[in-house]
Image (cartoon, rainbow, N blue to C red):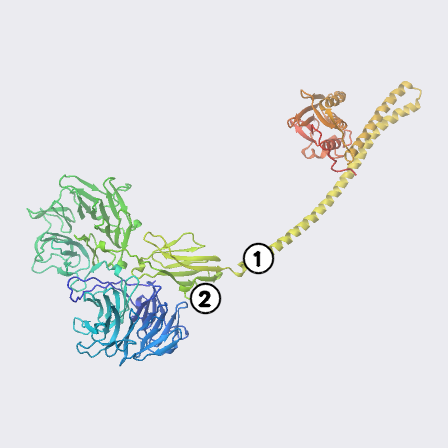
Amino acid sequence: MLKRKFHCSLFIAVLFFLSGKAQQYYFRHYQVEDGLSHNTVFCVLQDQKGFLWMGTKDGLNRFDGNIFKVFRNDEQDSTTIGEGYIYSLHEDTFGQMWVGTSNGIYKYIAETESFALVRQTKGQGIGTMGNDAKGDIWYISGGSLYQYIPVRDTLLNHGTAGAPDYVTAMRFMKDGSLWTGTYSGLVMQYGHPGRSFYVFGHSPASSSRIINRLEDAGNGRILVGTTNQGLKLLHTDEGTYEDILSYKTDNIPIYIRHIHQTAENEYWIATESGIYIYDLAKRQYINLRKQYNNPYSLSDNAVYFLERDKEGGVWAGTYFGGINYYPPQYTYFEKYFPDNSNRSISGNAVREICEDHYGNIWIGTEDNGINKLEPSTGNITQYKPGKDGSGLSHTNIHGLLAEGNNLWIGTLDNGIDQMDIRTGKVIHHYSAGEGSFSHNFVVVFYKTRAGDLLTGTGAELARYDPVQQAFVKVEALPHCAPRGIDEDTTGTVWVATADQGLFCYNPATGEKAQFTASRGEACALVSNELLTVLVDKAQNVWVGTEGHGMMQYDRKTQCFRRYTTAHGLPSNYVFRILEDNSGRLWITTSRGLACLNPASGKIRVFTTINGLLNNQFNYNSGYKDKHGKMYIGSVKGMIVFKPDEFRKDTFVAPVYITGFTLSGGGTATKDRKSILYTRKITLPYDQASFNIDFSALSFTAPEMISYAYKMEGLDRDWTFLKSNRLAYFTDIKPGKYIFMVTTTDANGHPGKHPATLEIEITPPFWATSPAYLFYALLGISLLYYLISRYHYRQNLKQKRKMEELRYKKEKELYQAKVDFLTNVAHEINTPLTLIKGPLEQVIEHPDDVQGNQQHLRIMERNTDRLVQLTNQLLDFRKTESSSFSLHFTHLNISRMLQDTCDNFRLPARQKRLDFRLKLPGKALFAYADEESINKIFSNLFSNAVKYAEKTVLVELSETDHGATIQIEISNDGNLIPDDMREKIFAPFVRLKENEKQKGTGIGLSICRSLTDLHNGNLFVTQRDGRFNTFVLRFPVTAGKFKQPANPSK
C-alpha cells in the first residue's frame, strides 16, 4: 500500500488590484517516498480513461490515485521506453498517447503496456507536442517544427516554419490553427506569413525574448509566456499586445514554464517562482509559493507543468518537489497554525474560541496565549504574558468569553484575566479565595439570556456579581467540575461536569435536576464523565462523553439515546457539539470531525484526507459565528469552514481492475496483454490462488472510496471494503467465474457499473470432459463386465441349485412314489387279506350257507374298499389331466353338506367325537360340479373324523356379499405346523405325526385340484390355537372352467 502525505498548501495571497482576504489553496504532495520514480516532473497528462501520467527524469509514471506504476527502460526488452528524460506527453483525438523523450518519440501501446519508437525521431529531444484535425503529430525539436503522419509513418521537417530563427513554442488553437513562438519574440500563425507579431516592441529592454508557451485565450487573444518578461496578452485581431504579468514583487522577471486554463478567464501559470493564478477578466492574480515553515504549501517553486483533471483538481509538476495536487472539492476547511506568517496563530493546541461585538474572533491556546483573528483581512494579532503586568497571566488558556469591550479569560490554575478588547491589555485579575471561586483552574464561560456571566472551575459553577465585581458560587449546584454550559429557551441552564454527570437548573423558578449514569437502566447516562453540552434549536439536549460517545436527552421520554462508533462516529471521545443553520450537528472527536443529520441519523466523517489539519480535536473547542461559519480547534491549530458552502461531489469515478497476480508471483495474461484490456483469464487448476487489484480513478480523496466486489459463481453476496483495494482468492475450484468490482454509493450500496473480468479455472487433465467421458465408458465397461460376470456366476449357481433341487425333487418324488405304492399296497393288502380269509372259509365250507353269507358280506365290504381306493387313484389322475372337465349344475350346497355330514355321523360316534354342523338360516345354492363337490366334502370330512381327537366342527356361510360360498371344517387333531400348511396339499405328502393313520396322501391334493377347477380356494389355518381349520371357498356363479396347471405325466 502506498504511503501518502496529504498536505494542503496554505499561503499568503498576493493580489494585483485586489485587497482583503485571499482564497485558500491546499496542495497534496507525492514524491519518491510515495512511489514516484523521480521528484523532477517535466510533464503531466490525464488520459481518456482517467489515469494520470507523469514524465520525469527517471521514467514514466502512471498513477491511479493509490499506486504509481513506473515504466523504465530495460536494455533487454525492446518494447520498453527508451533511455533519457521524458519531456512531453500528448494524447491525440483517437486516444493514442505519444511520449516525447530526450531520445525521440515513443508510441504507447496500451493493450500490452509497451512502447514503440518512432524510428525517424530517434536521437531528437522532443519538446511540446500537439495534433491537427487529421491526427498528424506536430512537435518541436532543436528549434525546428516537425510533422509526423502516423498513417503513412512519414516525418516532415518544416524547419523554422517561416520564422527567422528557432521555433521555441507551438500551440493548436481552438479553431484548429497552429501558432508558433520563436527565440526572438515573434508569434506567428503557421501557413500565414502575414500573421506574425512581435511582442516585445514597447516592453522594457530584455536580455531574452524567448517565447516558452502559448495559450488560447479566446476572441483572437493569445497568452504568451516568456522566459524573462512574464506573461503577455496578444490581440491578434488588432495586432497589439500588453504585458499583464511581468515581474515578481521583488522586481525579478517571471520565467514562465507552462500555462493552463482551469476555468473561464482563470489561468494557472507555472513559473520558476511558483504558480500564478490569473483572472483575465478582473486582471487580478495570486502567487502561490513554497513556504518553508508551511508543510501545506507548494513543495517547490520551480513549477514545470500544470494539468487539470476531470474532477477539477490541478496537478503541478515541479523540478525538486515531485507532483503537487490541488483538490478544490476539499478546500472548504481554512487552516490556521503556527507558521511565522501574518496568518500564523501563536500555539498549536487551540482551546476556547469566541467572537466580540466588533466581529473579531478570539482564539485561546493551551500552549501559547491568545490570538485575535480579523476575518475581513485574515490578519492575526497575538497576545501573551507581558512584563508590564498588562499582559496575560498565563499562556495556557481554557475559557474565553467576549462581553462588550471585555474579554474574560480563564487560565490553567491561574484564575481569570479581564482584558479590554480595545487596548488588548488586561485590566483586572481574579484569583480563587474567600468570597470568590475556590479553584484557579477556570475551564469555561457562558453568558445567559438573563445576562448572568457564569464560569466553570475545577471545583464549582460560579456567577459574576457586577456590583461586588466578584465571582460567587452558584448554590443550586453542588461541588462539581463544569466542562460545558448551555441554556434552553425556558432559561434552564444545562451543565456538563467532569465526574458528576449532567445538571440543570432554572435560576428563575429554582427547579433543578441531576442526571447520572446508572447500570442496568437503559434510559440513563452511560457515563458521568462529560465534556460538552448543546441545546439545539429543537430543544434537544446533547452531551459528549469521555470515551462513551454522544448522548441525546429526550424530554418527553426522559431517556438518553446513545451514538457511538457503531453508529458511524469516528471515535467515542466527543469534545464539542455545534449546530449549523440547517440543524445538522458537527461533532469533534479524537479521530476526526463528524456531521450528524438528526432527522435521518446519517453520519458523515471528515478527516485529514478531506482537508483537516489533523484528526484529533481539542476539549470543548468550537464556535459558530453569526454568519454560520464554524471555528474548531485541534491539537495542531484551528480549522474554519462554512457548512452551507459544502457541495455534494457528483463525480462518478470509473473503476478499473489494475492488477492480477498469482499467489506464487507472476501474471496470468497472455502475450503480455494489459489487465486493463483483458476480458478473460484462463488458469490451470494448480494456479487457482490469486490476487486482484482494482482502483477507482478519483484523486480528491481516494482513501474515502469504499468498494464492493463479488465473484459470481463463488460468492452469493457482495464483499465490502473500506480500506483495501485487493481481493484475495485461494484454491478456487475449476469452473467459470465473473469477478465484479465497483464503488459504493452514499448509502453503501454497490454501484451500477462494475468492472468485470471473466476467470476460468481449467481442471486437471484427469478432471476434463474427455477424461470424464473415458471414466464413464470405463466405468460402464467395468460395470457391464461385473454384471455379466455376476449373472454368469448366478446362472451357474442357479443351474447347480436347479440340478440339486431337481435331484432332490426326483428323490423326493421317488420316495413319495415308493411311500405311495407302499401305502397303496398296505391299503390294498388289508382288504385283500380280509377278502382272502373269508374266501378260504367259503371254499373249505361251501355248505355253510349262513357262515358263507357273513363271509361274503365281509368280502363285499373289502371289495368296495378296493373299488373306492381304485376310484381315488383314478380321480387323482383325472384332476391332474388336461382332459378333465366339469359339469356345472345348480346345487343346493346346504343339503349336500347336510347329507355328507349325515354319512359321517356313525364313524364320528364310533370315535365318540363331538360332531357339529352349523348351517345358515337359508339354503345356499351354487353352480358347481356335483360329483367334484361331493368328493371334496367326503375327503375333508374323512380327514376331519380320521384325525380329530374329540371335536369336529363344520360351518357353512357366504362371503363377498353372497358371491362366495365358504365352508370351514375344523378338528382338534395334531396342529399342522406353519411350514406344512401349504405342503400338505401336495401329492403323497403326509405329516409324520399321522403316519400311523391309514391313507395315501392324495386326498387333499385331489380336493385342492378340484377346488382350483372351480376357481375357488382351499387352505388350512388355525382356530383359537386348538383347531386345524380347512377353509373351502368357491364362487356361487359358474365361472370359466380352469384347466389343470400341471398335467400329470
596 with respect to 998 (left or right): left
Q: Is residue 366 above or below residue 933?
A: below
Mark 1 secondary-structure assignment: helix
Question: In the image, what residue type sits under mark 2?
Answer: Lys
Identified by mark 1, the residue type is: Leu
Q: Report if residue 636 is visible in the image.
A: no
Location of residue 643 in the rendering, given as x and y in whole percent from the top left corner: 22, 54
How far is mark 1 from mark 2, CA to CA? 30 Å
Percent of width and height locating residue 346: 16, 61
The tag on residue 670 is: 2
Q: Position of residue 92 (x, y in %)?
A: 35, 69
Q: Quadrant of the C terminus?
A: top right
- Circle 2 SS class: helix
Name the quadrant of the N terminus. Answer: bottom left
Give the camera-side residue of 1049 and 138: 138
Q: Is residue 340 above or below residue 986?
A: below
Which residue is labeled 1 in the image?
773
Q: Residues within 10 Å of mark 1 (few under 14, many from 20)?
A: few
Tag 1 and tag 2, C-beta contact below 8 Å: no
Location of residue 281 (image quadrant):
bottom left
Q: Which mark is residue 907?
A: none
- Image side of residue 813 versus residue 399, left or right: right
Q: Quadrant of residue 105?
A: bottom left
The structure residue drawn at horizontal position 60% and vertical position 57%, both measured from the top left corner, is: 778
Q: Residue 6, located in which quarter of the rendered image?
A: bottom left
Q: Can residue 710 be seen? A: yes
Count the marks: how many? 2
* Residue 171 x, y percent position in the rendering: 29, 72
Q: Residue at x 63, y 53 (%)?
A: 784
How dense is the environment of label 2, judged by Cα within 10 Å: few (below 14), some, or many (20 and up)? few
What residue is at 30 percent from the left and 59 percent from the top?
A: 701
Residue placed farthest to the top in the image? 850
